[in-house]
Amino acid sequence: MNRPNKRVTVYLKPDYHRALRVKSAETEYSVSDLINSAVKHALLEDAADLEAFEKRASEPLMAFEDVLKSLKRSGKI
């Protein structure tokens, strides 16, 4: 499904906005294209994290303190 883009207001730090404008001019991608690409990559990273969590959901839980104790006992820290 190819829906039209949604217009939103985003407040950027001035340095980020300047960097995006410069990159846009150098790459011939619009600022919107650059932001959409960054958001897509962030969402893909989140999806990969969630998939990894689902794959490990059946593993036993360990308290952080227990992991530290085990590392100390084995001389790894």
Image (tube, rainbow, N blue to C red):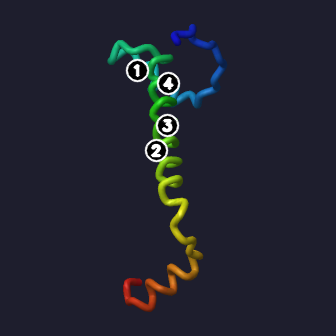
Q: Nearer the viewer, residue 52 or 6?
A: 52
Locate residue 10, reporting x and y percent: 63, 23
Locate residue 68, reporting x and y percent: 51, 81
How busy is the neighbourhood of tag 1: few (under 14 within 10 Å), some, or many (20 plus)?
few
Q: CA distance from mark 4 to mark 3?
A: 11 Å
Mark sitting on residue 66: none
Locate residue 27, reporting x and y percent: 33, 17
Q: Secondary structure at mark 2?
A: helix
Residue matched to label 2: 48
Question: Which quadrant holds residue 29?
Answer: top left
Residue matched to label 3: 42
Q: Pointer 3 and pointer 2: residues touching (CB < 8 Å)?
A: no
Q: CA distance from mark 3 to mark 1?
A: 22 Å
Q: Secondary structure at mark 3?
A: helix
3 or 1: mark nearer the eye: 3
Q: Quadrant of the C terminus?
A: bottom left
Q: Earlier in the sequence, mark 3 or mark 1?
A: 1
Q: Earlier in the sequence, mark 1 or mark 4?
A: 1
